[in-house]
Structures are given as structure tokens and as C-alpha cells.
Image (spheres, rainbow, N blue to C red):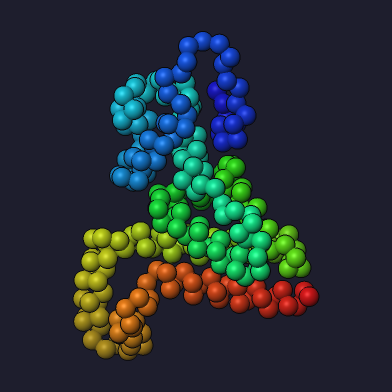
Amino acid sequence: MPTTVELLWGTAQRPKRGPKPALTLDGIVAEAIALADAEGLAALSMQRLAERLGFTKMSLYRYVPGKEQLTALMLDAAIGEPPNSADVQQDWRSGLRDWGTAIFARYLAHPWAIELTLGVRPFGPNEMGWTEAALIALAGTGLTGSEKLDTIVLLNGHARNLAQQVASMSGEGEVQFTEQFTAMMTAAAGRYPAVGAAFAEEAAAPAGKGGPDDALRFGVDRILDGLAVLIDQRN
């Protein structure tokens, strides 16, 4: 059976003879992503996936050994290709801001993928490409390799955490939070004036101000502000 790395990087040996496969690995992964997008990662199983594809569960194992390998392929496909290297070969700050905005959009499109980015695991070519793109943006800054990689961790962490929060607050979650927060502030009865003032000011902000886009930009720009100080020290 092919390993996760072999499947991610396309190095698994394929049979040279025999009938044309009824399924393709790309098709299986695409259907698995559609299922996770619609119902969440918890709803994904080899049995459910086989039923959606109109095949038996055992037939899927001819293409992918199990759910661990399947989810690794799903993550790499969902993250997709990184920003074009030509797009990030601008000034480092603009390049990294575009990078952070783009990866946030990918996480928001597939919130289930966030869970799969945690822990020790092999990277696929798309994920590796995102790292490459960010490193290209940082070329010429004078930062060390370790500092560049830590910068990517900070930006990715901010985008990932915010996307996870936004996903949990969408639809009924937002309504539930609003109701719960109103009840909490009523129960607190002025015990936390700074909290009340901050949220009141946010609620009074002009339309289009606040929200996940502003939170993303604010966090990214503050990370880049700190990085600019370090880069100035190096140069």
C-alpha cells in the first residue's frame, strides 16, 4: 500500500497493466471535500464516501489505504496552490499581507481543514508551496532562515485562528453568541465597564468597519510592524 507521502507527492507506483480504473484519486478526494464542506469532517467516513461515489468501501481502498491518507490529500487539495511567486516578489510587507489574506480565505472556505493542520504530519506539494511563496516574499530582508520560518508560523497562526473563530460564529453561532453576550452583560450589571465600552464602540462603528476582515488586517499589520523593526536592525 502507498504511504501518505507517496500519495501526496505522486510517487506511488501505479499498475501498468489491467483494466482502466473506475475511479480516480482526484475524484475521490474532490468528493470527500464536498462531503466535508457540506457536513463537516466528523461526517466523513470511508463508508459514507463510498456511498456518495456509488461504490463499495473496499473498492476505495484500492486507491487510498484509509482515512488518515485521505484527509492528508483533502487538506493539500483544499489549501490549493499558493499565490503566484511573481505576485509575492514585491516589497516584503505587501507580499506577506497578500499571503496572509489568501491563506485566510482558503481556511474560511474549508474550515474543517484547520483541524488537519495541527500535529506532526507530512506536508503535500501545495502546503510546501505556500511556505516557499512566503520565503520568496522575505528574500532580501536580512532575516535568518529560522526567523523567516517563525514569521510564517505567526502569520499562518493568526489567519488560521481567526478563520476558526469566524466559522464557529457564522449563522446560528453568531445569533447564539449575541444572545449569550447580552445576557452576560445584563448579569454583570456594570461590573466590567471597559468590556461594555469596547463592545459599544465596536457596535457604533460605521458600516463596513470591524468584523473578520478588519481583524485579519489589524493582526497581520501588527505582526509586520514588529517584523519591520527587526528587519531595520538587520540592515
Extreme right residue here? 235
Image quadrant for the C terminus? bottom right
Question: Hey, which residue is sitting farthest front in the picture?
Answer: 86
* Image quadrant in which you'd find residue 182: bottom left
Q: Residue 223, position in %: x, y? A: 58, 72
**Taking 35 as reference, is 133 left or right?**
right
Residue 165: name its quadrant. bottom left
Whether residue 172 is visible, yes or no, is: yes
Q: Which sits in the foreground, 126 or 201?
A: 126
Nearer to us in this view, 132 or 50 = 132
Q: Residue at x 77, y 74 (%)?
A: 234
**116 to 44, vertically: above or below:** below
Residue shown at 57% from the left, 16% from the top: 15
Measured as percent of width and height from the top left, residue 131 is found at: 62, 53
Residue 102 position, x and y percent, is: 50, 59
Q: What's the residue at 42%, 60% (across, down)?
A: 163
